[in-house]
Image: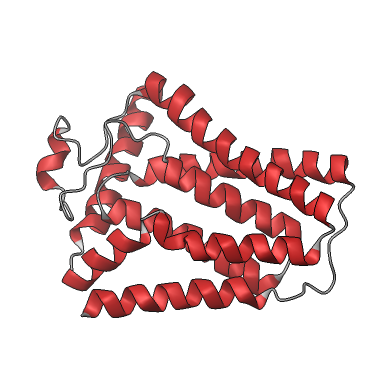
Amino acid sequence: MMTDLLSHLIEMDEALLLAINGWRAAWADAFMYAFSGKWIWVPLYVSLVYVIFRNLPWRTALGCAVAIALTITFADQVGASLIRPEVCRLRPANPENPLSEMIHIVNGYRGGRYGFPSCHAANTFGLAFFLVYLFRQRMLSVFILLWALVTCYSRAYLGVHYPGDLLAGALLGFIGASLFYGLFRKVCRYRRPDPLVQGWIPLAVGGLTVVGMLVYSFC
């Protein structure tokens, strides 16, 4: 019974991946490859750090920065160092995976060997959920969650993660954010700023980054 259920879930996971990866366009290849990158989002991270230190007392802001770092480290290391070596699920694009013959590869990128859970999903959703808890500001929360969601979609589009990898990573990020935000709130006696000062800056920086990637993708 459990074996049949697991087999069915794996088949659904593969079918959904092939549907996402199978939709191909030259501009989408460029856009998804760029969106999935790490360094492209440095300006967004800097703007978020600025807003945190702009709205919180410096000791509280420093504690918040440490809590975010711990959230991302927890999500990344639990996924990469503890779960992946035990599960050993090959990435779809890995040449050792028979499914790789049906995967559309972008710019020769295949990722590492194993992909469950997705550390991209764990890290981005860990940061996103922490910020949702931290500020409870509607527009910023919607933007940062959409950012994490599109990041996950880009990983499936590139063929380096199954949707199940991404879902597990997002769950891991949620657990890490919930745990370390709770600790931060208790230790630093955090009080949410109301109103949030200059909360529009990450929205502007993130939006301009996306626009820049779109322009680049269509050129």
> As drawn, which residue projects farthest toward the left?
101
Residue at image coords 37%, 77%: 212
> Where does residue 199 sit, x and y in percent of width and height?
69, 73
Q: Residue 24, percent across and down?
A: 18, 65
Q: Quadrant of residue 55?
A: bottom right
Above-or-below relation of 115 to 200? above
- Drawn side of residue 23 relative to residue 132, left or right: left
* Residue shown at 71% from the left, 76% from the top: 198
Quadrant containing the C terminus in the rendered view: bottom left
- The outermost residue toward the front is 58
In the image, 171 versus 40, the foreground residue is 40
Q: How is the image coloured?
A: secondary structure
Quadrant hosting residue 144: bottom right
- Whether residue 51 is visible, yes or no, is yes
Q: Residue furthest top?
A: 86
Question: In which quadrant of the rendered image does the N terminus lie?
Answer: top left
Q: Is residue 7 left or right of residue 107?
A: right
Q: Position of residue 71 (x, y in %)?
A: 62, 41
Above/below status of 197 relative to 170: below
The answer to whether 203 appears left or right of 208 in the picture is right
Can you see residue 150? no
Direction from residue 163 to residue 208 in the image, left or right: right
> Which residue is at a point 67% across and 51% down the rendered structure image?
130
